[in-house]
């Protein structure tokens, strides 16, 4: 019973922590949890079509060579899974009334990606217990590698989806979404490739595979962090705030009636934004007369 509870916690905890982590970074208008849970459920369901397609195009039953590891990682797993996740995200959110800022694309894609990872975790845990009895180790490793990787792939894909949502040119919109999908496939493929290589390389070379896994996760986190910051700044501008205020702005605070950028169409259902100040460096809320940001520590005093 204790083992079952530990396994359950290892499956639920990383999903919940990562979902909340990216949700609270939506500083301007956070999405309702009802929408997030619907997308999370859609991510769980997306495992079914992905599994059917993967089974149909799988060239070999087992990974026995570097070539089969590459094919399985980039084509079978990376391409199929990211395309299926994108299809669910696009169909459920692109025309949604809740899609009001660029950061929304990130939280939508993260929710679907974590739903996918959640079902995958359950599948791998059951498979490991029935075959080798190593379910605890499998879920523990996936909690710190595979689950964050799915979430970070969602950040990368969702960043470009959010940008595409507010583009008027259909050609630019499609090109931007394709870039997001390709980057997500690339990161997903490299992660799986290093993991699958451990199944075919001799034991004295597996240390390089572990190094590759750690490297790709670090690069994913760095890329996702940059995309989150960029989406926060662009979303801030969409709501009419100035990220580089003057001394007068710091004293009286921004006004919600600043004209919107041309690429953003202000919806009629937009809620009024309160007259509050934000750090021009990280976007965190600050006191109107603060000299330093309590979140990033930057000096807010305008230069002389």
Image (cartoon, helix red, strand yellow):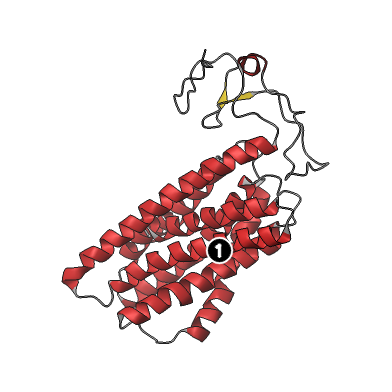
Q: Quadrant of residue 8?
A: bottom left
Q: Around disc 1, counting alpha carbons within 10 Å, would you say few (fewer than 14), some (14 to 19), or many (20 or more)?
A: many
Q: Does residue 301 lie above or below 69 as drawn?
A: above
Q: For the point 48% across and 19% down, which residue is it?
A: 292
- Position in image of residue 154 (x %, y %): 53, 57
- On screen, residue 181 versus residue 269, left or right, reads left
Which quadrant is the N terminus positioned in?
bottom left
Q: For the point 50% across and 61% down, which residue is it?
A: 183
Q: Does residue 123 lie above or below 96 as drawn?
A: below
Q: In which quarter of the image is residue 260?
A: top right
- On screen, residue 34 versus residue 85, left or right, reads right
Q: Is residue 152 visible?
A: yes
- Position in image of residue 252 (x %, y %): 67, 15
Count the numbered circles shown.
1
Q: Does residue 124 lie above or below 24 as drawn?
A: below
- Position in image of residue 143 (x %, y %): 39, 57
Between 47 and 139, the residue placed more toward the observer is 47
Q: For the point 33% across and 77% down, which residue is it?
A: 131
Q: For the point 43% across and 55% down, which residue is it?
A: 148
- The outermost residue toward the left is 204
Q: Can residue 121 be seen in this view?
A: no
Task: Say which residue label 1 marks.
Answer: 181
Q: Does residue 67 lie above or below 281 as drawn?
A: below
Label 1: state its secondary structure.
helix
- On screen, residue 77 versus residue 269, left or right, reads left
- Position in image of residue 200 (x %, y %): 27, 78
Between 169 and 145, the residue placed more toward the observer is 169
Between 246 and 214, the residue placed more toward the observer is 246
């Amino acid at each position: 019973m204790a083992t079952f509870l530990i396994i359950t916690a290892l499956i639920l905890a990383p999903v919940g922590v990562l979902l909340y982590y990216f949700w609270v970074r939506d500083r301007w208008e956070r999405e309702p949890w009802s929408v997030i849970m619907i997308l999370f459920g859609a991510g769980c369901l997306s495992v079914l079509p992905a599994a059917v397609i993967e089974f149909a195009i799988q060239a070999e039953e087992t990974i026995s060579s570097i070539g089969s590891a590459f094919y399985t990682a980039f084509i079978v797993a990376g391409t199929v899974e990211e395309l299926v996740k994108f299809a669910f995200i696009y169909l459920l959110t692109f025309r949604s009334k809740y899609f009001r800022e660029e950061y929304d694309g990130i939280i939508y894609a993260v929710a679907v990606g974590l739903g996918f990872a959640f079902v995958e975790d359950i599948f791998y845990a059951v498979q490991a217990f029935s075959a080798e009895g190593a379910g605890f180790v499998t879920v523990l490793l996936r909690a710190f590698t595979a689950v964050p990787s799915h979430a970070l792939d969602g950040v990368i894909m969702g960043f470009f989806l959010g940008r595409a949502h507010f583009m008027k040119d259909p050609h630019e919109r499609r090109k931007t979404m394709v870039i997001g999908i390709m980057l997500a496939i690339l990161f997903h493929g490299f992660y799986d490739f290093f993991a699958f290589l451990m199944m075919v390389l001799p034991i004295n070379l597996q240390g390089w595979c572990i190094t590759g896994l750690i490297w790709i996760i670090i690069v994913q986190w760095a890329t996702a962090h940059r995309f989150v910051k960029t989406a926060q700044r662009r979303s801030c501008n969409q709501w009419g705030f100035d990220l580089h205020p003057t001394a007068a702005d710091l004293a009286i605070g921004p006004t919600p009636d600043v004209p919107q950028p041309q690429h953003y169409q202000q919806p009629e259902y937009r809620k009024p934004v309160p007259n509050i100040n934000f750090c021009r460096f990280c976007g965190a809320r600050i006191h109107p007369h603060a000299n330093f940001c309590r979140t990033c520590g930057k000096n807010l005093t305008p230069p002389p």
